[in-house]
Every structure is written in structure tokens, then in C-alpha cells.
Image: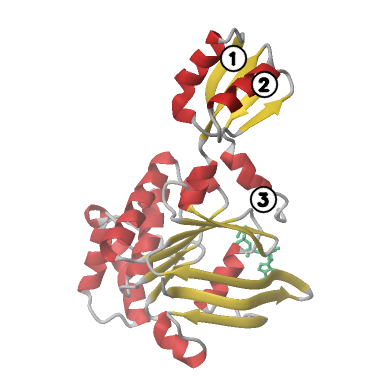
């Protein structure tokens, strides 16, 4: 997979404080990569360096394989939404986008109508910005980032402050852009669950350091269910499980609890096995692992403001 974004030992210091520690990070073509971290972890600083709004203290950035002067051309293939864009409250969506279209030198006026259509604001295009809901404002922000027909979008907290419906709207929009227009997406949030149904890769950042980088597949694996059992005789239960299922993965916990991590689909069979062998089963249930807890543990203490 070729890298759309690549950084090498990228750092950023504000005065003496190094808020981004040497960062080697890449986003592959076609990915929806989620950058997850608490407030102050360094997400916006990374995005601003990618957008050229902040100069890195050290390190290199490659966009579409280009760095330095050559990167200017490559940057035209990127769309950024970093912090909510400042729209004119009394302008309509069309007027706002027209202002930015001219400012950014996007030749075709028709593009405004195209992007409004893409983000589902075509019917609201004549409404004033101040009359927009939060979700509509965020969608207009995404429309703006799409103005120059980018191949990659970098979106800083685009679902911040939205309700469940607003989050779903943005999620559908981004999935559509990724699948139908093959747009690579780098998106940040401080809430993992908001991006869980969207991203294909999850990068967790704490105090300017990447602490975990996992694929969706691995994340799903970690969110697998387990069987929770409470029995009168844990030793006998363990023995029965081991004898019946050679590769059984289980944990014996206090309070006569045993949890089983594989053969989940055989829950009924396991229950029958124990009862048949006179094990008293006091609790038997399927439970989800506390995935959010696990990952939030990784980013906890990320320098709250
Ligand atoms: N211009 C600046 N001058 C000094 N310190 C800054 C500046 N911008 C950011 N910082 C500091 O850098 C650290 C990272 O901030 P950053 O905004 O990148 O975090 P974030 O993960 O994007 O958080 P948030 O979601 O709150 O924006 C914080 O400690 C912040 O106070």
C-alpha cells in the first residue's frame, strides 16, 4: 500500500516543551485512519504540521511521496479541516463557499454545487450559516475541504459536539467518500467509540507519542466476547475444559469465576458438559470485553488542558 502521508522523526517544540516526540507515522492509500487521543495529546499539532500551518521543529513530511518544495504540488491533492472553519454567519452556504473558492483559486464555480450535493446540503444551500445546526456546520466544513477535489482528507475532530444523529450523518458521508471516490481519510477524535464504526485503522496518541497502532481487524478481535462462568468447583471445570477442548483458552479468577476466550460458539455445549459432570453452574453468560476501557487506558493522562 503506497503512503499518502508519511512522517519521519517529526517533532514539535513550543518554547522548551516538546509536544510531539519523534514521530514516524504513515497513512496508506484508501485507509480511514483514526488518530485517537485526549485533549492536548497533540492531534491538532500534527495536523497543522501536515497542513503547513505550523513548522516542524525537526523531521520530514512526505505527502504522496513528495517532500520539501515538491510537496506544494502534492498538497493540492489534500483537503484539510483543522478547527471549525470560520464561515461568515450572515452568508449562505453558497456565498461562503464562493468566497473560499475564489480565495483558493478553484476554477469551476460549479464545484460549489457539487460539494454541497456530496455533503447533503443541496437543499439548504440558501440558508444562512448562523441558521445551520451543528451537524450542518460540520458538513459545510467538510464541503469546504472537498472544494479542490482532494484525494486525501485530514479532518480534525469533525464530529466534536455532534449528537448521535449528527455523528451517523458524518460517518455515512465519510464512508461514501472513501468507498465511492476512493478518498483516503485521516480523522481525529478524543472518543474512540465515535470512530469505531468508521475507521479501518486506529492510532492512539498520548503526550505526543503513538502508544498503539492497530488495524480494525485487531480491534475487532480484542472486542470479541468471552464466556463468563461461576461454578462450585473451578479445578474440576478446568480439568473438564482441558480434556474436552485441547486448545481451550481460559482464565481462572477469584470468586470461583472462570472466563473462556475461545470456542465461544460452543457455549451451549460447554454448559451441557459441566452440568452432565455434576458441576454446579451458578452463572453462565457471554460478555463483551471492555474494549474502550482497555484502549482508553492507553491514552489516559494525555495532558488534560
Ligand atoms: N501555539 C501553541 N503554543 C504553545 N503550546 C501549544 C500551542 N499549540 C498547542 N500547544 C500545546 O501542545 C499540546 C498539544 O496540543 P494539541 O492542540 O495538538 O492537542 P490535541 O490533541 O489536538 O487536543 P485538542 O483536542 O484539545 O485540540 C498541548 O499541551 C497544547 O497546550
User: Is label 3's Cβ within 8 Å of ligand 1?
Assistant: no
**Pointer 2: what residue?**
257
- CB-based contact (under 8 Å), mark 2 and mark 1: yes
First-in-chain label (2 vs 1): 2
Classify mark 1: helix, strand or loop: strand
Residue at which label 1 appears = 283
Q: Residue furthest bottom?
A: 69
Say which of 3 and 238 sits in front: 238
Residue at 57% across, 10% down: 277
Q: Nearer the viewer, residue 291 or 19?
A: 291
Query: Residue 286, relative to residue 95: is it above or below?
Result: above
Nearer mark to the viewer, of 3 and 1: 1
Q: Residues within 10 Å of mark 2 (few under 14, many from 20)?
A: some
Rendered-image quarter of ligand 1: bottom right
Up the image or down, 56 lies above or below 97; here it is below
Q: Nearer the viewer, mark 2 or mark 3?
A: 2
The residue identified by callout 3 is 298
Q: CA distance from mark 2 to mark 1?
A: 9 Å
Q: How dense is the environment of label 3, judged by Cα within 10 Å: few (below 14), some, or many (20 and up)?
A: some
Amino acid at each position: 500500500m503506497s503512503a499518502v502521508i508519511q512522517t519521519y522523526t517529526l517533532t514539535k517544540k513550543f518554547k522548551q516543551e516538546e509536544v510531539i516526540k519523534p514521530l514516524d507515522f504513515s497513512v496508506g492509500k484508501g485507509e480511514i485512519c483514526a488518530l485517537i487521543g485526549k485533549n492536548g495529546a497533540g492531534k491538532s499539532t500534527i495536523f497543522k504540521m501536515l497542513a503547513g500551518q505550523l513548522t516542524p521543529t525537526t523531521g520530514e513530511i512526505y505527502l504522496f511521496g513528495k517532500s520539501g518544495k515538491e510537496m506544494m504540488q502534492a498538497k493540492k491533492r489534500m483537503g484539510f479541516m483543522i478547527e471549525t472553519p470560520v464561515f461568515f454567519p450572515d452568508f449562505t452556504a453558497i456565498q461562503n463557499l464562493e468566497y473560499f473558492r475564489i480565495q483558493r483559486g478553484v476554477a469551476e464555480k460549479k464545484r460549489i454545487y457539487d460539494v454541497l450535493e456530496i455533503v447533503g446540503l443541496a437543499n439548504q444551500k440558501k440558508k444562512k450559516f448562523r441558521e445551520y445546526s451543528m451537524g450542518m456546520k460540520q458538513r459545510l466544513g467538510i464541503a469546504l475541504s472537498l472544494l479542490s477535489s482532494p484525494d486525501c482528507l485530514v479532518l480534525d475532530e469533525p464530529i466534536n459536539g455532534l449528537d448521535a444523529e449528527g455523528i451517523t450523518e458524518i460517518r455515512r458521508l465519510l464512508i461514501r467518500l472513501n468507498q465511492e471516490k476512493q478518498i483516503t481519510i485521516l480523522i481525529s477524535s478524543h472518543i474512540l467509540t465515535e470512530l469505531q464504526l468508521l475507521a479501518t485503522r486506529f492510532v492512539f496518541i498520548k503526550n505526543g507519542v503513538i502508544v498503539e497502532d492497530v488495524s480494525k481487524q485487531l480491534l475487532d478481535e480484542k472486542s470479541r466476547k468471552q464466556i463468563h462462568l461461576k461454578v462450585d468447583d473451578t479445578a474440576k471445570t478446568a480439568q473438564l475444559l482441558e480434556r474436552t477442548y485441547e486448545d481451550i483458552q481460559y482464565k481462572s479468577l477469584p470468586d470461583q469465576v472462570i472466563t473462556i476466550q475461545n470456542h465461544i460458539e460452543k457455549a451451549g455445549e460447554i454448559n451441557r458438559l459441566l452440568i452432565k459432570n455434576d458441576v454446579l453452574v451458578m452463572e453462565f453468560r457471554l460478555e463483551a470485553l471492555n474494549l474502550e476501557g482497555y484502549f482508553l487506558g492507553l491514552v489516559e493522562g494525555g495532558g488534560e488542558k
